[in-house]
Image: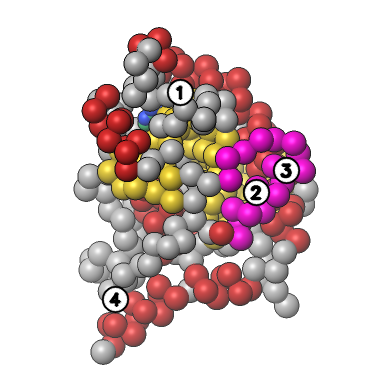
Amino acid sequence: MSKKIKIGIIGGSGLDNPDILKNSKIKTAPQTPFGKPSDDLTVGEIEGIECVLLARHGRKHNVMPGNVNYRANIWTLKEEGCTHIVAATATGSLQEHIKPGDVVILDNFIDRTQGRKQTFYDGEAKHPQGICHLPMEPAFHEKTRQMIIQTAQQLNIAVHKTGTVVTIEGPRFSSKAESNMFRQWGGHVINMTSVPEVVLAKEAGICYAAIALATDYDCWKENKEEHVTVADVLATFKKNCTKVTALITAVVPKIAKENWDQSCKELQQPFMTANVLERS
Ligand code: ADE
């Protein structure tokens, strides 16, 4: 029998509407070896498929990007039995052709965070033991990404099929010089949260994909009118977040119809390596 599918949904700023789940109830945020997740969980169903919704910044949006307990968030979703995570994230655009309001299905990242805990294997007592050197290609789960892209095509939602996200530490936005440097490095969009979320999900053996909504042009453009402000970010995703929720709602039952045994097996590899290294 194939593995039971359960989908974790991590909602970003304004992209964490609990109404997308049917028969939902609140489950108190559990204690994990890494502390508590950002908030209580909303557990429920989309077309009969079990889902767990977690608001990355808390339901009251009171957890700053650098203070999110990414390890507790991913650990909690793993403990809940999630085989997949579909994450939503608001991003600035670093490229002219990615316009505010556009959706990007991320496929790579550049890490500009500082000092965030990026592994469960930190050598502390009561944490997973061993040494884990996690391969980061592919960073995002390819089969899950492709399912989101296919779903978007069926729904007639235009998406950019690939995109490299630069994740900065924040909470400040980038300087213009930084923004231009990230453009030269090949970044397509910029946010403050994809790292270490994607890294930890992979370490936990969860199929992780992220739907990025471009909300602004950061600050690399000459035209000051187009430089990012919090008000722009909020207004743009309020206008466009229905696209993201429609996409999540439609992809969940499609994911559940597939057999993911091979994917889940492949993603177990880091655990195996950690244990082998520990013994040798
Ligand atoms: N989130 C939304 N827009 C952003 C930007 N320009 N920089 C970093 N994070 C963002």
Tell me the quadrant of the picture where the C terminus can be found. Answer: bottom left
* Magenta-colored stretch includes residue 144: yes
Q: What residue is shown at x 43% (from left), y 63% (from top)?
A: 137
Task: Give SS at disc 2.
Answer: helix
Amino acid type at circle 4 is: Gly
Residue that extends furthest to the bottom in the rendered view of this protein: 280
Tell me the quadrant of the picture where the N terminus can be found. Answer: bottom right
Amino acid type at circle 2 is: Ile
Q: Establish if 270 lies above or below 277.
A: above
First reached walking from the N terminus: tag 3 or tag 4: 4
First reached walking from the N terminus: tag 4 or tag 2: 4
Q: Are marks 4 and 2 in contact (CB under 8 Å)?
A: no
Mark pair 2, 3: CA separation: 9 Å
Q: Quadrant of residue 154?
A: top right
Q: Which residue is mark 3?
A: 153
User: Which labelled disc corresponds to residue 216?
Assistant: 1
Mark pair 3, 4: CA separation: 43 Å
Q: Are marks 2 and 3 in contact (CB under 8 Å)?
A: no
